[in-house]
């Protein structure tokens, strides 16, 4: 009789990069031994191998990439422009990133060798003349062979065109193809395709290149050129600008289309108290979304549906309450930066997509969040009211 040797399921295991348990072959189970090594060590053994660092000769050719950041992060379009420079750079080329604002992203992972930050010009500050002066001063300081920028409608595209006009530099806009020798774009209303050698300024369309790189850059942060920093500081403190910044107007989240919303909370079949859910959305200032099941049940109108058969969203924060995560819904949130899932089922498909999963009842979580947000708002208002009351009494006493 042949005895089949079976693997003891209680044998030591590690957590692979995919999140699955992997039994350690060749190791026996020891009573009382720790079964789960550190997650960091497991990811090092089974996760992605570290990417090599791109090497280049200092003092050679330079490519300058300029873009605005959004709350410390570059959007996908800006990342693609930086990746285009990194991919086409040879061993004698250095890639410098100029950020209008702060950068909390990993600059090396994005492909930058050096990073310059100008926090005073972060969005939503509207100072196109100061941004133009800063870009001009950085070009003068680093003498880049070419300047690359995302061709968007949120400031970078306009800044690139203004710089090219002022510097009398050659420029290519709406670039959809780029390699080390040429750039290409559509012409004659899309009926023809034109190519040329690299101009001085290159404005790339979205999805011209992939932002995923097989290597990393040096990621060294350097101080802005003195002339640029001084110009920004002087301009910020003076009224000599031809432009007036009247600030931003906060719209009611309910008036913002889902495709344009930056913060969305979405309800699925697991949300039973719709009124409490909508009250949380008002407290958070978030737009309201829903799964197809919730819409079909009549809880939300069809324009709130998120997914392949509804709206595709690209919010910075997307919180899914009681949504299991059907393929169609996951397709609709593929471009969201941070996804948070609240679900009782830890194995739900939405948990695999989420950056953070809260294993809890949706109704209880909604109530707790609403209470926490309300208390936080009251805590901020109380000191301000006290200070205002003090000023009023002082004025009356005077």
Image (cartoon, grey):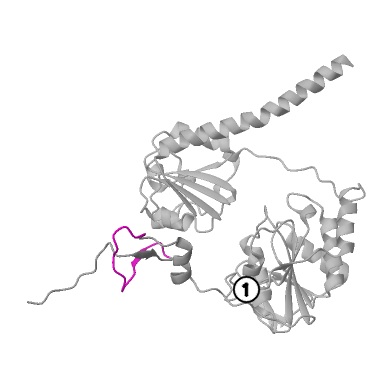
- The residue depicted at 40 percent of the width and 44 percent of the height is 322
Left or right: residue 315 versus residue 362 is right
Left or right: residue 237 versus residue 91 is right
209 w.r.t. 257: above or below: below
Image quadrant containing the C terminus: top right
The part of the chain drawn in magenta is 18-34
Viewer-closest of 102 and 310: 102
Q: Residues within 10 Å of mark 1 (few under 14, many from 20)?
A: many
User: Residue 165's spot in the image, x, y percent?
Assistant: 85, 67
- The residue depicted at 68 percent of the width and 39 percent of the height is 250
Task: Look at mark 1 in the image and give the residue it sits on.
Answer: 216
Q: Main secondary structure of the magenta part?
A: loop
65 w.r.t. 267: above or below: below
Magenta run includes residue 20: yes
User: Residue 92's spot in the image, x, y percent?
Assistant: 73, 84
Kindly state the secondary structure of the residue where label 1 is placed.
Answer: loop
Viewer-closest of 177 and 265: 265
* Residue 294 in view: yes
Image quadrant containing the N terminus: bottom left
User: Residue 255's spot in the image, x, y percent?
Assistant: 59, 40
Q: How many marks?
A: 1
Left or right: residue 339 versus residue 68 is left
Q: Quadrant of residue 130?
A: bottom right
* Residue 187 in view: no
Viewer-closest of 162 and 39: 39
Q: Residue furthest left?
A: 1
């Amino acid at each position: 009789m042949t005895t089949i040797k079976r693997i003891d399921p209680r044998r030591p295991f590690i957590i692979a990069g995919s999140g699955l348990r992997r039994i350690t072959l060749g190791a026996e189970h020891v009573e009382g031994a720790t079964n789960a090594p550190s997650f960091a060590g497991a990811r090092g053994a089974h996760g992605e191998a570290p990417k090599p660092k791109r090497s280049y000769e200092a003092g050679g050719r330079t490519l300058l990439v300029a873009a605005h950041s959004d709350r410390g992060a570059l959007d996908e379009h800006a990342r693609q422009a930086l990746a285009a420079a990194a991919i086409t750079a040879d061993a004698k080329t250095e890639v410098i990133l100029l950020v209008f604002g702060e950068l909390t992203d990993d600059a090396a992972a994005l492909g930058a060798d050096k990073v310059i930050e100008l926090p005073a010009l972060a969005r939503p500050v509207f100072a196109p003349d100061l941004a133009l002066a800063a870009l001009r001063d950085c070009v003068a300081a680093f003498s880049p062979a070419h300047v690359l920028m995302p061709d968007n409608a949120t400031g970078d595209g306009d800044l690139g065109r203004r710089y090219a006009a002022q510097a009398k530099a050659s420029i290519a806009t709406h670039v959809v193809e780029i390699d080390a020798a040429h750039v290409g774009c559509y012409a004659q209303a899309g009926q023809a395709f034109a190519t040329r050698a690299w101009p001085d300024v290159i404005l790339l369309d979205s999805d011209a290149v992939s932002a995923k790189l097989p290597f990393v850059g040096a990621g060294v942060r350097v101080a802005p050129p003195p002339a640029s920093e001084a110009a920004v500081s002087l301009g910020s403190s003076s009224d000599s600008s031809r432009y007036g910044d009247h600030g931003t107007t906060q719209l009611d989240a309910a008036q913002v289309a889902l495709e344009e919303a930056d913060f969305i909370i979405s309800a699925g079949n697991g949300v039973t108290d719709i009124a409490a859910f909508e009250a949380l959305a008002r407290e958070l200032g978030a737009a309201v979304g829903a799964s197809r099941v919730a819409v079909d049940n009549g809880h939300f109108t069809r324009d709130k549906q998120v997914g392949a058969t509804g709206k595709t969203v690209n919010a910075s924060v997307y919180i899914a309450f009681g949504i299991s995560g059907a393929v169609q819904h996951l397709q609709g949130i593929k471009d969201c930066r941070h996804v948070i899932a609240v679900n009782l089922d830890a194995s739900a498909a939405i948990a695999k997509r989420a950056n953070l999963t809260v294993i809890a009842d949706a109704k209880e979580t909604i109530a707790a969040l609403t209470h926490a947000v309300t208390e936080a708002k009251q805590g901020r208002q109380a000191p301000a009211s006290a200070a205002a009351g003090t000023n009023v009494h002082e004025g009356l006493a005077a």
